[in-house]
Image (cartoon, rainbow, N blue to C red):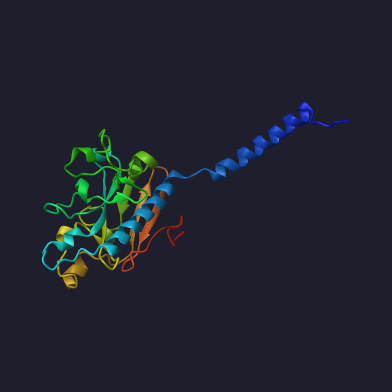
Amino acid sequence: MKKAFTMIELVFVLVVIAIVAATIIPRIQTNALKEAAIQLVSHIRYTQHLAMNDDKYDASDSNWFKKRWQIVFINSSKANYKYAYTIFSDSTGGSTGDPNVEEIAKNPENSSQLMTGGSSGGEARLGYNHKKFPGMKKLNLGMSYGVTDMTFSRSCSVNRSKRIAFDFMGRPMKGKLGAANGGGNSTAYEANNLIQTNCIITLTDGSESIQLKITPETGYTCVLNSEGTACI
């Protein structure tokens, strides 16, 4: 005699699967804030990589130090009033501190995209909502991940400026590079621009927060655990 599932057995199996799915799925659902932090860590490390592989020192250019690779964060109309960031080298024009299209790093996975989520540069198309926006919308942390606030610890904040640059050794620097000392080894250079203690960047979505740490000298960047005591 050929055996088969009865309707009751089939319904029972489906109920069990539904219960198991309801238990497991919430555990594997992604956390948008954590995704934002992981992405940001990756892109800070990429900025450091660019800086170490593209030394901007030029003895014939007194403003060479302004051209180091950096990652800058904004929260303005160009970013739809959300927190967004851009990776660029301020290498053309007057090194104003704001990126132009030709200064922004290209997405290593898609060279037609620029690594910006909306920029304060003068070009209209760098605005997040521009119809010809050439950037990567996931770099807008507010629009993509619901980030509502971002703070920098005092060790890496200069006049509320939210930007991190790296020198050719991969050492993290704070503030606008226009204030840096061109000598590269002077006391003023080290005291005014090199980050001396751990830089803590805090992201929040209004209900929870997560922290990133950038260490001085090495520039090592990681996401901290919920207690803020160790990298995860």
Q: Position of residue 54 (x, y in %)?
A: 25, 62
Name the foreground residue: 97 vs 195: 97
Say if 128 sits above or below 95 in the image.
above
Question: Which residue is drawn at the image coordinates 38% and 56% (left, top)?
Answer: 212
User: Is residue 148 visible to us here?
Assistant: no
Q: Position of residue 39 (x, y in %)?
A: 39, 50
Question: Which residue is drawn at the image coordinates 17% and 63% (left, top)?
Answer: 65
* For residue 17, side relative to residue 151 (left or right): right
Say if 80 sits above or below 226 in the image.
above
Name the foreground residue: 25 vs 136: 136
Query: How many numbered marks have been drawn onto this rendered protein structure?
Result: 0
Name the foreground residue: 42 vs 19: 42
Quadrant of res 207: top left
Quadrant of res 67: bottom left
Question: Which residue is drawn at the image coordinates 79% and 28% (left, top)?
Answer: 6
Q: Position of residue 227 (x, y in %)?
A: 45, 57
Quadrant of res 49: bottom left
Q: Position of residue 224 (x, y in %)?
A: 43, 58
Find the residue positioned furthest to the front: 111
